[in-house]
Image (cartoon, rainbow, N blue to C red):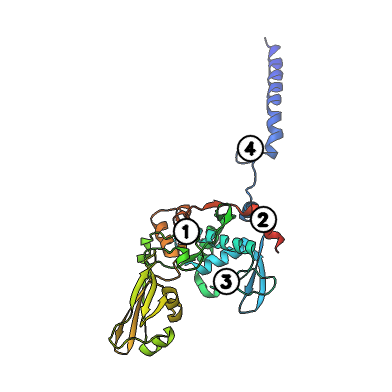
């Protein structure tokens, strides 16, 4: 039995070496998390590019410098959302605004310049005529110490909706938006000439919390009459509302036999809204308005109110744009890149 002990030890050592060799070979190359083969996550930029597809650039005519600036589509959308909607709005409202802004420029780039004059090579201006756009440097001056926080919120909303646009019957919609409703949005044909099936009047009760829900403007009786080209009758009457729109705004007003539309009066008097009323106090006219903006499409304060109640950006855009589908612009990418 004494002669067997070295043999047993030798056999045991052999099996130990056989079992340990694979481990010794793997340990130097293994992963500290458990040895599994892992994949490095792609960057946010890579994810965005994958969603958007071929690179699309927007040529923005900068009104102050009179120069055309080209920048990637998603960077442009960040600059628009940051300029058009308060950065402290709910994130789902910012996402809804991202879809509206992206859809607006995609539709415009596909259809070309409509109704405005731009220099050759420009797709859009940076003003309220189209969509307000501000560069990061301009936003730094505007936001100052809040720049980092605000930009992170806006960028998050844009990135999480990257490559998404609103379509109706497989075509990008005219994604109109405005600040504050009077409690209702407006049918497109009752403010402009075109009747679009997705721009229909809907209730928007959340706007009552907007600081822009009501406003007053005071002007002299003389200026009021001059601007409208009317003369109040001597009997003291101040005209009468003949009709209202579906969205409860003024459709037509009659003053001393002259009929004016609510839109005409809003434009000539530079009012916030076409939902207005006025009273005469001495030699002055006090005009009270309800809401702010043209009233067609998505109300921004309404969107924020919906988001505050837990609604998603999909819920928001579906409420304000009837029958739309959230889609990718990939099918239009070749046309968009060809126009550059």
Q: Nearer the viewer, residue 332 or 162?
A: 332
- Eyeballing the image, is 67 above or below 25? below
Distance CA(mark 4)–CA(mark 3): 46 Å
Which secondary structure, mark 2?
helix
- Residue that label 2 marks: 333
Task: Sort mark 4 into few (<14), some (14-19) or many (20+) by Cα contacts within 10 Å.
Answer: few
Instruction: Report the front residue among 45 and 217.
Output: 217
Q: Residues within 10 Å of mark 3 (few under 14, many from 20)?
A: many
Residue 134, label in figure: 3
Q: Earlier in the sequence, mark 3 or mark 1?
A: 1
Horizontal relation, residue 114 to residue 182: left or right: right
* Callouts 4 and 1 close, C-beta under 8 Å: no
Local packing at callout 1 (Cα closer than 10 Å; few below 14, some 14-19, many 20+) is: many
Q: Marks 3 and 2: in contact by CB < 8 Å?
A: no
Mark 2 or mark 1: name the one nearer the start of the chain: 1
The label on residue 36 is 4
Q: Secondary structure at mark 1?
A: helix
* Location of residue 98 in the rendering, given as x and y in whole percent from the top left corner: 53, 60
**Marks 4, 1: nearer the viewer:** 1
Mark 2 to mark 1 CA distance (whole Å): 28 Å
Q: CA distance from mark 3 to mark 1?
A: 20 Å
Residue 197, percent from left and from top? 49, 57
| Numbered badge on residue 91 | 1
Looking at marks 2 and 3 on the same chain, the residue that comes earlier in the sequence is marked by 3
């Amino acid at each position: 039995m004494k002669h067997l002990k070295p043999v047993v030890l030798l056999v045991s050592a052999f099996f130990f070496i056989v079992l340990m060799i694979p481990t010794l070979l793997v340990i130097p190359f293994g992963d500290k998390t458990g040895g599994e083969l892992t994949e490095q996550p792609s960057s946010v930029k890579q994810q965005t590019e994958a969603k958007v597809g071929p690179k699309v650039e927007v040529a923005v005519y900068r009104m102050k410098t009179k120069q055309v600036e080209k920048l990637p589509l998603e960077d442009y959308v960040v600059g628009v959302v940051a300029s058009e909607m308060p950065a402290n709005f709910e994130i789902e409202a910012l996402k809804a605004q991202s879809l509206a802004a992206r859809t607006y420029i995609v539709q415009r780039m596909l259809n070309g310049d409509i109704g405005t004059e731009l220099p050759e090579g420009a797709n859009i201006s940076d003003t309220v005529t189209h969509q307000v756009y501000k560069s990061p440097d301009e936003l730094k001056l505007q936001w100052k110490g809040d720049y980092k926080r605000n930009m992170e919120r806006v960028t998050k909303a844009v990135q999480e909706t990257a490559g998404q646009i609103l379509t109706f019957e497989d075509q990008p919609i005219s994604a109109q938006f405005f600040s504050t409703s009077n409690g209702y949005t407006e049918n497109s044909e009752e403010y402009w000439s075109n009747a679009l099936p997705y721009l229909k009047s809907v209730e928007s009760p959340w706007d009552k919390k907007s600081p822009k829900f009501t406003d007053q403007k005071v002007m002299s009786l003389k200026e009021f009459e001059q601007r409208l080209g009317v003369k109040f009758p001597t009997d003291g009457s101040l005209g009468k509302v003949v009709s209202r729109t579906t969205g409860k705004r003024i459709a037509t007003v009659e003053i001393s036999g002259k009929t004016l539309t609510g839109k005409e009066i809003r434009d000539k008097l530079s009012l916030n809204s076409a939902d207005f009323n006025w009273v005469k106090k001495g030699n002055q006219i006090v005009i009270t308005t309800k809401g702010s903006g043209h009233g067609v499409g998505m109300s921004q304060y309404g969107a924020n109110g919906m988001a505050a109640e837990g609604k998603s950006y999909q819920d928001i855009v579906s409420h304000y744009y009837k029958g739309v589908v959230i889609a990718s612009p990939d099918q239009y990418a070749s046309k968009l890149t060809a126009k550059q």
